[in-house]
Image: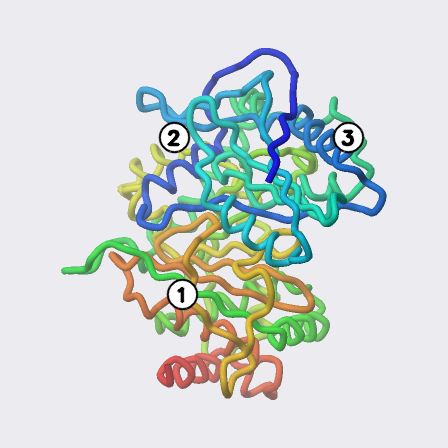
Amino acid sequence: MLRESVLFDEGEDWEGPATWGQQSFWDGLRRYDRTAWYLNAAPVWEVPEGREIADVLRLIGRAVSGFEGLRTDVREVAGEVRQHVCGRGSFGVDVIEAAGHLRETVAATVRRLRVQPLAGPEQLPFAAAVVTERGRPRQVVWSLSHLSVDASSVRTLLGHLDGTGAWQLATNRSPREQYQLEAGDRLRTVSERSVRVWTATFGDVDLPFAHPRRDSAPGVAQQVLTSTAAAGRLEDLAGRTGAGTAPVLLASVALAVGALLDSCSVPLQLVTSNRHRLDGADYLGVLAQLGPLLARVTPDQSFDEIVAQLGRKSMRAYNSAFWSPRALDAVLRDVGREPDEVLGAACTFNDVRGDFPGPLPHPGTPDEGRDFALRPLDWWPYQGGRCSLAAVGGSHVLQLAARVDTAYLPAQTAEQLLVAVNTVIRVAHVGDGRERAVGALYEAVARATDAL
């Protein structure tokens, strides 16, 4: 393995307050169980034909110079969360020869870089390696700290790499500029409106994971379900309902959680990176925050009706995921709610399908007698909570990852949650109108989870 040095020079160092997204993610790391740290995202980019090592190193250096988020470290200083921008310097890129074992070499590199510490003074929030075959660059492995980028930032970065590489750098907002925007009057108004939606939605709702269990040990349980069949069913359901796969998946998650809670009032917290805001499309930094959604269902409602309902409600939740952590904290206390009893106290759901690394690098072999594989998950790359669910993949394979904090939930809840979501998708896909009613879906989930 060789190590090449790459230079960047975009000005002077800068330090200032963290953005709302950075504060929110840091708050989550502090608030939730820390025994399973959010490890780095490690996407893999395939190098186009005709590129030489020098071309790839130049492209990586241009990305680091052009996107301030790749040079922004988040840290706590004297009780305040702050961001520090490194203006100029150099970083090392590993060049690794695969020697006929490309897939194995890339997988090993991903595993190594995923656990590499990427935070702290004198440390850039990323690492990169180039894997070659007979000297030709084949794949680039990025390792990106979740304290500096969110899932949609990963897609933004990979989208630029897959394009011409000719960025319009003047249009790329930086985390420093994001903070300056959030300190202004326009976004303060947006934050106040979002906070009002939070209190209106969750102000007096009994959230299911607000308080620790008695005599429970701290820890986490994490599982992943991989299914090609579920991906196909999801596409079919989206076509049948005319709603798209996102509302169908959201409805499946809401009904699965409702069945496990035996409740017709299902509180969810949706993770969104606010990429639907047109002025943030090319932002490379942390925008991800939570939006509140309360699904109210009755036993005789149909699956299609729930899809339509949540399709409408989800947009309000997504548009409300843009708030000042301090402002939300203060207002929650004003209405008699402790932030610890609200933030992360409902199931959090993150739909990050697209160009983002899945929990497993390839589809798992289905378990015997099943059309899906269920495996333990030893790392968690997504924004979490006490009960968390993330959906990754696309039209060919769907991966659902679940994480539960065992101080609040039994460990087996992670497996039950995954099987419940898969069951809702399967029964809603094959059943008739009566079988697709909420009550029947709840019964199907109960049978499937009892069999575990």
Q: Nearer the viewer, mark 1 or mark 3?
A: 3
The residue carrying mark 1 is: 265
The residue carrying mark 2 is: 326
- Give the residue type at disc 2: Arg
Contact (CB < 8 A) between labels 2 and 3?
no
Q: Nearer the viewer, mark 1 or mark 2?
A: 2
Give the secondary structure at mark 2: helix
Give the secondary structure at mark 3: loop
Q: Residue 335: x and y, percent?
A: 31, 40
Q: CA distance from mark 1 to mark 3?
A: 46 Å
Residue 87 in sight from this viewpoint:
yes
What crowding class fits label 3: few (fewer than 14 Cα within 10 Å), some (14-19), or many (20 or more)? Answer: some
Q: Quadrant of the C terminus?
A: bottom left
Q: Earlier in the sequence, mark 1 or mark 2?
A: 1
Q: Residue 241: x and y, percent?
A: 68, 72
Residue 192 in sight from this viewpoint:
no
Give the secondary structure at mark 1: strand
Q: Residue 416: x and y, percent?
A: 39, 73
Q: Earlier in the sequence, mark 1 or mark 3?
A: 3
What crowding class fits label 2: few (fewer than 14 Cα within 10 Å), some (14-19), or many (20 or more)? Answer: few
Image: 54 above or below 113: above
Q: Which mark is residue 167?
A: 3
* Depth check, front residue: 385 or 61: 61
Quadrant of res 312: bottom right
Q: CA distance from mark 2 to mark 3?
A: 35 Å
Q: Is residue 58 left or right of residue 365?
A: right
Quadrant of res 57: top right
- Give the residue type at disc 3: Trp
What crowding class fits label 1: few (fewer than 14 Cα within 10 Å), some (14-19), or many (20 or more)? Answer: some
